[in-house]
Structure formats: C-alpha cells, structure tokens
Image: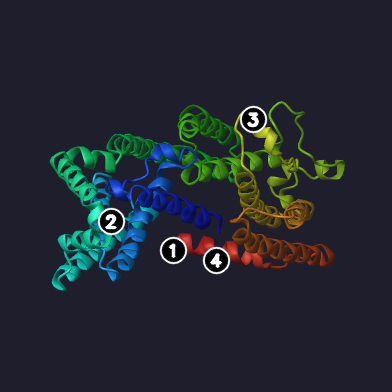
Amino acid sequence: MVKRMLRTKKEAIAFRHFLLQDGNGGKLLPPSALPLVTDEEYLAGACIGLSQDLAQYAVGRATVRDVKSVRVARDLVQDIMDQLLLFDFRNGPLRRKYDGTKYALKTLETILYELSVTGATLDDEEEKETKEDGPDTKRAKVESDAADAAMEVDKMEISDERIPTSELSSLRERMERRDEMREALIKRCRDGQKAAKQAIFALHRNDDTRASKLLKQCHQCITNDLLPMVEEEPGLRYGCFANVLEEYVEGKMFYAWLHGLEGEEEGNGMNEDEKKGENNPKKGNRLRHRPRGRMLQPDDFHPIHLEPDEYIGGLCDLTGEIGRYAVQRGMDRDAPGVRLCLETNKSIMVAILTMERTPAGTGKKMGALEQSIKKLEKMLYELSLVEATGRNIATEVEDAVEEKNEENND
C-alpha cells in the first residue's frame, strides 16, 4: 500500500511538471528533482508511469480536438521510449512495467491517426485559436508563429531540453554498475552458503573440527567479500546475501547449542550417573557428549549486523537441525537428550509467538516448527514406554532409519 502511494505521488509530480511545461513542448521531470527517490523508483514512476498517464491524458485532449497537446504527449513518450531502449532490464518489476510504455506509445499514435482521418489538423486548431483571439491579438500570433519557426530550426536543442539525457545516462551507468555487483555477489554467496551447509552436516557427523573451520570460512566470506559490496549498494542486502546470513546464523547457533562458544569452559554436560554409563555399549557412543544448550543473541555475531528477519529466520531453521539431532539421541535411548531438544524447540516457538510482530517469512516456518515439536513429543513418549517396560520396543524413529538404510543398501 505504501509503495503504491509513493509511486502514485511520483507520477503526479511528473505529470504536473509536464503540464506546466506544455507550452514549451512538454518536458520530463529530471531525476535530480526527486533526490529521495531511488533510480528504479524514478524509472517506474516518473518515466513509465508518466507514459501511461499521458496516454490517458491524450484521450481527453483528443475529445476536444486538441491535436497539439496529443502530439506533445506523443513526442515525449517517444523520447522516453528511446531512452528506455538503452537500458538492459533484467527480469523483474521494471521489465514488466517497461512493456506498458510500448502500449502507451501505440495508443498515442492511434489517437493521432484517428484525428487525422477525421480531418483534425494542427493548422485547423491554430486557425480556430486566431478567430477566438480576434484582430487585436493577430500581432501576438505572428510573433508566436515566428518563435515556433525558430524552435523548429533548433529541434535538437528542444529535444535535449525535453529529456534530461545526461542525467538519464548517469542513472543508466549506476544501474549497470549495480547489476555487475549483483552478479558478483551471487557468485560469492554460493561459496559462503555452501560452507555453512557443510558445517551443519559436519556437526551431525560429530566432526566438530571441520565444522568450526567451515564456519570460519563462511564468516570470512561474509566480512571480507560480501559486506563491502552490500555497504556500497544497500539494496543488494535482500536476496541471496540474506540467505547466506540465515544459513550462517543457523550453523553457528547449532555449533554453540552443541558445544558452546569458543573459549568457554569445556565439559560434556553429563551428570555423575551418565558418566558412569559412558562406556556402556548398550548406551551407544553419543552419550559421551551432551549439548550445552547455549543460545546466541544477535550481538554474539558481531561485527556482522543482523536484521530481525535474518536472525529469526536462522533461529527457525535451527529447530530443524535440533529435531534431526534428537533422532540420533532417540536411537541411543537418550531420553534426557531428546527432552532437551524438545524444550529448546518449545522455547523458541513460545518466544516467537509472544512477539507483537514477526518478519514476513516467519509464518511459513512456524508450521514446520510445530510439526517438529509434535514428533519430538511422540518420540519422548515412546522412549518412556521402553524405559517403563525394560524391553526393546521398535519405535517410529528406528523404523524410519531402518527403512532408509535398506533403501541405501539396495
């Protein structure tokens, strides 16, 4: 709604500027007249949007047989079209809006043709104005005709004044520079996102050394390669760069949840009873480490500044990795470990639900979080049955893992 109102306002300002300059051939509002507007917003509103407004304006002027005004509007839209043809619009909103300029120009050409077929010409309009003015204004009319003739001789100069060519050229160069930076950013984002994903896989394999190394690589990629480009062009933050930050937040938070931050006191987080059964083969080999349950805050990612949607997006994705880790703990009959996973996911869900307003993409991830909590509750219930009966009972978790292993063997 706000973007639509701003776009309408820019179109109104450009259209008002055209009407005030109508006597001088109609002019396009230069970008320097809208200092708070981005280049894309200027093209969408003051150029493309204006072209569509002029097509509607010409319909009204053609109704009263005002050929001159229709021709002025057509000439301006033609010049705007010539300038837009110099841009290399990538697929997006501007590329779709650009087609509207072609249709607006076609509408204006059709109106002029229909007026000419019905006998309306610019000479007839001037004769009509002369009769309305009367004999007292004939001398002024002659002087006006002389001025019009001089303007026809210097037509190229008029065209330059009608279209701010130099400012539009600078605008086009800035957009081309941003497109080049965007392509470079996309390529570098792949490396950072890949390192963060591989770090998460390494944590699930208990390869903590490799996970730490990959997270450092991702951190260096963000701070050394990506952030300088985003600081130069803030508009590039939203997209692939935000996805890298979410993946990095997910990986680093998963590492801290398992092992804590680097420099903290080491410990496996087990109580005395668990330490006694550490070497019991029936307990499995994953009881040798209990997650520390450390949750990172946005300030813990300094010097990387995180937007709320980036931090909350990574936090929601973290619950999925905790759910996968809980499956491993359930296979080893580690009910306390599964309970910790369940409590962590529940705490995250409650924290998000109690927020007054959440980022736009959070709602899509809440459904997966709710399903994860339900599965963990069912898993914990099955483990309680195993503990109460003292027997081995095939759980849904084991059935799923066994089926997957059989598929891999086949």
- N-terminal-most mark, 4 or 3: 3
Where residue 155 appears, as percent x and y from the top left, is 17, 42
- N-terminal-most mark, 4 or 1: 4
- N-terminal-most mark, 2 or 3: 2
Quadrant showing the N terminus: bottom right
Q: Nearer the viewer, residue 283 or 144?
A: 144
Residue assigned mark 1: 410
Quadrant showing the C terminus: bottom left
Q: Which mark is residue 73?
A: 2
Q: Residues within 10 Å of mark 4 (few under 14, many from 20)?
A: few
Mark 3: amino acid:
His
Figure colour scheme:
rainbow
Extreme-front residue of the structure = 136
Q: Quadrant of residue 177?
A: top left
Q: Which callout, 1 or 3, points to the residue nearer the camera?
A: 3
Q: Residues within 10 Å of mark 3 (few under 14, many from 20)?
A: few
- Separation of marks 4 and 3 at Cα, in angstroms: 43 Å
| Identity of the residue drawn at 20% across and 44% down | 143
Q: Quadrant of residue 275?
A: top right
- Looking at the rendered structure, the secondary structure element under dot 3 is loop
Q: Which callout, 4 or 3, points to the residue nearer the camera?
A: 3
- Separation of marks 2 and 1 at Cα, in angstroms: 72 Å
Q: Are marks 4 and 1 in contact (CB under 8 Å)?
A: no
- Separation of marks 1 and 3 at Cα, in angstroms: 47 Å
- Separation of marks 2 and 3 at Cα, in angstroms: 54 Å
Q: Which mark is residue 302?
A: 3
- Separation of marks 4 and 1 at Cα, in angstroms: 11 Å
- Looking at the rendered structure, the secondary structure element under dot 1 is loop
Mark 1: amino acid:
Asp
Extreme-right residue of the structure = 272
